[in-house]
Amino acid sequence: MENIEIARRLEELADLLEIQGANPFRIRAYRNAIRTVSGLTRPLSEVAAEDALTDLPGIGKDIGGYIGELLDTGKLSILDEVTAEVPRELATLTRLDGVGPKKARKLWKELDVTTPDELEAAAKEGRVAALSGFGQKSVEKILRAIEDFRKHQGRFLRAEAVQYLRPLLVHVEGVEAIRRLEVAGSYRRGKETVGDIDLLALVEGDDDRAGVMEAFTTFPGVDRIEMSGETRGSVVLTSGLPVDLRILGPESYGAALHYFTGSKEHNVEIRKRAQKRGLRVSEYGVFEEEGKGGDDGDANSDPHAGRRIAGATEEEVFGALDLPFIPPVLRENRGEIQAADQGALPKLVEADQLRGDLHMHTTWSDGRDSVRAMAEACRDRGYAYMAITDHSQAVTVARGLTPERLREQWVEIDEARDQVEGIQILRGCEVDILKDGSLDLPDDVLAELDIVLVAVHSHFDLDQATQTERILTALRHPLVDILVHPTGRLINRREPYALDMEAVLQAALEHDVAVELNTNPRRLDLHDRHLFRARELGVPVVISTDAHRTAQLAYVDEGIHQARRGWLEAGDVLNTRDRDGMQAWLKRREG
Ligand SMILES: [Zn+2]
Ligand SMILES: [Zn+2]
């Protein structure tokens, strides 16, 4: 079980216990533990294997036991006990803006409301406003929160947020007083999903600020204004995406950009490094400590304490701490500060270093465009090679190909090779891994392919040992080249299937199989943490789009963030090789 799933389960437990009326100290301890789990870069399973769960900050005996149980069984018996008394759906209610555990308890006890739908009905009938502690205002807020909840349950895909945000950026950038406008936060760190957007505007004169705020709040795509002050404004776009704007002067812009880019864990380490140098870092700048004693470097503490020695740019902030600039995608406290200190930051891969796309579909299975159209589009992107990889027969919903139809397709691929010059078209297939780990096409057919992709498209609910063995069996097959979308997750829709990723990566290494970073924004599979591990082990990674139409070949531009978050350099990515280099890899098992 992944750390994030464990965190989610514990969060649900804490929410329900709070609704139940449990001891507030206990709840607070649980919330602390959840923060630890969420911020942890190592898999909890590793920590548990070392019997070191309770060495983690905030993890006591109780929580350590719960984590152990989740890792061993995937279940949490205390959660079952609590949900026997408190309806589980109430945890969802507490995540609505303006509800929270106390109000959720009241809604449940007094109105028998447990779901957003029931809450909406009760609110519209005036039953909620009649409760003590709920005014008409808070009811309106709750109704809006329910609407937002339905529109986008959970977080926004980064690729979606990019689209919601773009028109706002164009609008605000048009204001003359703005010298620089940056998006900070998890968005700038290239995370796959974002909860909200932090915009930082650099404005020189105080007089111009009002105009900037005015432009921000009057953007036509603003659904409502939450707050509009002199230096800070907060709106929600019609898409439901919350956006904050901060207006800053030149002397502290870089420090604020660094601070609001995060991650929190990275910032904590940066502050520690500053302290060792007798410096203090805050969102206002880097300061020489004056009267030392008890100052914990809190960003909200007096910005005028001490002399500012840096702050205008991020380079300046890092420089004051004897560090080179650290790219935002690396700021997750995964060793980037140490690497920077040693001059060992990775030279991160760029989208324009990719020489080909090795995973795409056509009208032969569930794609929308022909072989030729895909080939032309790849050629137009400047690729040296590409692979046509339609589904195999077992994936009936995608009209997967039988050996006979696959051979028919090869005729069309040959035609496309004649028609579209300047690009090598590889004959491939996304071969289904059957339930027992065998492959969905006979070996003689596989042997005639230039490239063999394998993937799981069914039986997602096997237990971890069985699912892992299923995939290991496929990786042992001597004709397999790439394991694609290895965890099967669909962000905000489907959890990854239970898999021992360490075992999978080790097997990929042993059998000379590459693993895919699928850049479909809903997949981004492998995840950055797994990419990081693949790089450590030396398992080659392929970055492909899994395009089902020509336009989706552009998925690579958003997906590249994930590769960079995994510290990948060009040399770690197989499809940065030129045509000869790729050909040599495809023939690696021969001779
Ligand atoms: Zn697939
Ligand atoms: Zn596919």
Image (cartoon, grey):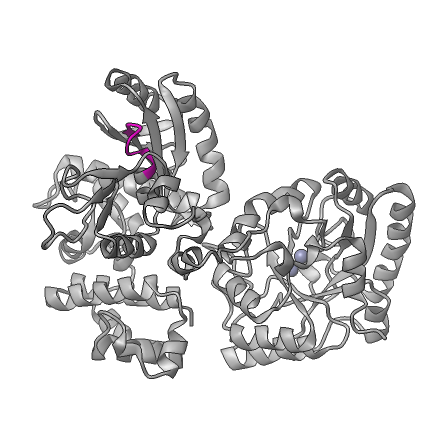
Q: Residue at x 86, y 51 (%)?
A: 413
The quadrant holding residue 314 is top left
Image height of 314 relative to 41, above or below: above
Q: Is residue 389 left or right of residue 205?
A: right
Q: Is residue 387 left or right of residue 22?
A: right
Residue 471 is situated, as x and y percent measured from the top left of the image, at 62, 75
Magenta span? 247-254
Q: Residue at x 22, y 36 (%)?
A: 140
The quadrant holding residue 80 is bottom left
Question: What is the quadrant of the N terminus in the image?
Answer: bottom left
Q: Nearer the viewer, residue 446 or 494?
A: 446
Q: Is residue 64 magenta?
A: no
Q: Is residue 312 left or right of residue 297?
A: right
Residue 542 is situated, as x and y percent measured from the top left of the image, at 65, 59
> From where the camera sits, is residue 118 visible?
yes
Q: Residue at x 24, y 19 (%)?
A: 206
Question: What is the quadrant of the C terminus in the image?
Answer: bottom right
> From where the camera sits, is residue 284 visible?
no
